[in-house]
Amino acid sequence: MLVSRELQHLLLQVLPSSSMMAQGRLLCIQNHLAMVCDSLWAINSMIEIPEMGVRYNEYPPSWGKLDVPVEFVDWEIDVAAAVIDVGELLSRIMDWEASLHRFIVGNTQQVNFRHVILVELKEMLCHLNSLVLRGSSMGLRRDPMGSMNPLREDYSIVLKNEVVGREEDLEKLVAIFEQQLVSSNNNGDDNNPFVIVIDGKPGVGKTTLAHMIYHHTWVRQQFHHRIWVDLPLVSTFKMITIIGNEFVRSINKEEYCDQKLHLDLPLPAMWEYINEQLCGSRYLLVLHCENLVSLMQPGEWNELKNILLRVGGCGSGVLIIYKSSTKSVVRDTGFLNGMKDIITYCLNPLSVDAWVELFKRQATTTIPSSKQDKSAKDAWLFRTYFPSQTFGPKVFGSLSQNIQAPFKTDFLYNIYKVRNFPLVIIRLHQYHHLLDVDNDYDVISHMLTAEYLIPTEGLERGWIQLYAGSLRYISRQLPALVFSRIIYLHMKVPEDSTIIPRYCRYLCLKINHRAIPFRLPTMPVEVSNKLITLILREHEEATQEDVEEITLEVYKKRRMKTTTAISKFLDKMSVRLIHLRILVVETGMIQRLPNEVSKLVNLRYLHLSKLKMELLPKSLFDLHNLRILSLLRCQKLQKIPERIHQLKKLQILKLAYCTKVQQLPKSVTRLKYLQVLDVEGCCWLSKLPEDLVSFKSLRILNVTRCASLSQIPHGIGQSIDLRKLSGIFIDVNGGFVLTQLQALTNLQEIRLRNLERAEKTQTEVLMGQQSLCDLSLHWGGEEADESSESATPLQVLEALRPNMHLKMLEIISFKGVEFPTWMSKQQLVRFDSLVEVRLINLRRCATLPSLGQLPCLKKLEISGMDLIKHIDNTFYGDGGTFSVLRELTFSEMLALEKWSEPERKNAYVFDKLQQLTLIQCPKLKEIDLHSRPYLFFGGTMRVWLNNEIIWSAEFCNWNNLRYIEIIEIVGCQELKCLPQGMRSFECLSKMTINSCNNLTTLVALDSLIELNIYACPLLAFNPEAFTSLRRLTIKGCPKMQM
């Protein structure tokens, strides 16, 4: 794992937080926390070089080796486990709540908890100090810049001694500050803060320069309050609340512990308090951001802008630093329009002399004096590899004597790059590795929520795309960087070893009940006492040993034996897993949960899937720290007990596809912190509690596929804090009315169904939804009434015109024959945030909208448009013609005959397209994209076409697709032999053919490396004809004799 990111999270986010300080004072353990903090900073100052060296050595010897001592590996693993243990302990301190804030001597509960925590803190301190001593004894150099909180006043001494080559930049920026301050004083009553943005390449030193400004003597004298705010990529709090909290801490001068002030006080009241306390004094606000644009919705930025205009005195300023490069600073900071002109300062790379000086300075601490001359020569050599990044001289200066030629320097840069990923991205990949499945985004999202890394509402749709993209990059380039295979352990049971190593903190057991003999691994007490996450999943794929045919009786015996073993394992472990935070059980072999589940007192997330239990155990409702309860496809579960209100901290209740649940208990409305209620697929659920609208905290309501639900609770239109509404049906009798949407101004996602029952309205009901990103509109199968009260489909769609910030649009079963005005060619170009569009079953529309006008469209699916015969110039419009589109699907296009390219020959058509899917287009006979020679270069094509022409010699357009890399052919019953035209596929490396019942033979493709064939009963071919083939899988093909 990347220990440094975990360390920085604890040191810069958790330990300095006002909540942790408040708990420390309440429990009188602030001195112990300070000592833990000091020990962690000492480790942090030593971790960077060994971490990069150890990770580099995990790769092939041909890439070169770093002469890093073997004991570094053991030390780093010990540090990783210790950091996780510290995080778990701090998490328990944060979770603990005193019933009354009385003195310790007067509260037995506080005394007992404090005693336990003190014992653990002392043991932890001993362990951390021993790691520091071990690191020192191994000769690890301490980096002064990583040895303390950079906001400490004495950090200015470190900067003065360690930073090289930035004196001129510092003087220029201070001069800009002075000029802005004079200008502000001359303007008199103008309180608008000025804004300065430091721009530059990643790793060039923007953050270090900002720290130099923060600690500069002139800045300290001129600004009464200096507020540094690290804004993460995502957060559990609104960014404006985080900024306000830091303002309050700065104003009070001391670590304040009044949690009510920053957590419960309404936002306007908190900022009014800040304004009163500032009393017209100047402030410097430093925003250290992962990505400004993706951090806040436009409404929140505007709110912050208006607040900054009101608080503080004349001459206040805002300094913005991006952790990554900013190519369009002015556009990204457009939220600050109305404030003073934004000044952009471009930070250039270090000069050659400064780079060499920094390298030599690092080298002198690790290289013997006899080799100092060599280090000077090495400095000039290594500078050619990393001319712009300041990390280059530090890393190479420290490692130069360990480097053996040849050396893959660009790979070391990749290591550094991944080490600076946001923690939430790193955890995404760690959990993905742990689960070892694709598309399990809900479970991963809930795990991140349980770790307080993302909001309860989860991640936006765009995040999933970011996640998938970065996952592919890491899996392909740097698989060992993020995952410590010992700490994040995925085991197949019983195939893998039955011994769980002592370092394991996150464990996934993938259970194969068919295996003989079946046994679960032994979990030592030292592991169970520190385990944070336990996942039990049923192995769905059969192994080679499983293909033997067995009788039903033998199968039942094996399954029963496995079920008994799992139940005993859970019974035994429930008592010992005292620090478990996450428990995921996904198997149909368990009929009950053990009563001892109540012993999991620190459990935050409980996910039960496919369990065959009819009732939940009473002991489950004693889990007072439970935040997330997820019951998925528990199809025998009949009801939710009234005792559910005892889960006082519950924030997410998910009952998806629990098909026998008919109603929710009334006591669910007593869960005052509940933010998410998800009952998707509960087809027998007849109604929701009437007083559901009394939930002040409710953010997400999902009633998709609740077929029996006939009424929506009255007053839902007044729940102004709702963020997502899914599956809401439209009906004037008991359902939702379109005009109710006008009051829900904070909605980010809306999924409406039964729009054929919508009433007439002249109002554009969504124009006030400035935060709306995701819009799904679904018409039902029945036709609208002819009464005057019913609106036509076109009228409804006109009334549902979204704002220009929309990111996803889905329209299903629209009954109109034409599109609304806001989908015209002239209007579509204004939707510059729209990245995904799905048009499904628009069977009466004879033309396609000009979707090529959308400048940022990345994913497009068009399905069931029966009247479309020709994809022509109308589809492309006058825009960039899908210049950033990555995924394109045409499905169930029954009349489609021809797909043409745009008339504009210089257009960048499908430049980024990586995935093309064609499903059931029976009349398609021409794909005329001949002027795009590198179309779909390195992409994937999925084909499910019962189309005789496509698979015959008449189809001559395969050459237009010759650069695809992967092709999947599924269910093509007209396919008898692969077309000869496929021989033109120059880059094809992987082919999968599935369920093509009439396929008899294949043509040899010279470039093919991997071939997978399933369920093709007539197929017979000679694999030796595929000269480059390395991997071959054949199943369900009886005529193939290998």
Image (cartoon, rainbow, N blue to C red):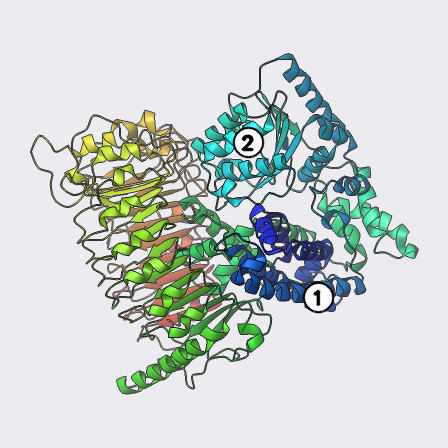
Q: Residue at x 43, y 53 (%)?
A: 985
Specify few, some or many for label 1: CA neighbours under 10 Å numbering under 14, 14-19, or 20 or more.
some
Q: Is residue 1022 visible?
A: no
Quadrant position of residue 1005: bottom left
Judging depth in this view, the residue of 788 and 225 nearest the camera is 225
SS at mark 2 in the image? helix
Q: Residue at x 27, y 87 (%)?
A: 553
Q: Which amino acid type corresponds to the residue marked 2 in the rendered image?
A: Ile
- Of all residues, the one furthest to the right in this rendering is 370
Relative to 60, 928 lies left or right = left
Quadrant position of residue 1021: bottom left
Q: Position of residue 796 (x, y in %)?
A: 20, 33
Q: Which amino acid type corresponds to the residue marked 1 in the rendered image?
A: Cys
Judging depth in this view, the residue of 895 and 1005 nearest the camera is 895
Quadrant position of residue 61: bottom right
Q: Which residue is mark 1?
A: 126
Q: Which residue is mark 2?
A: 274
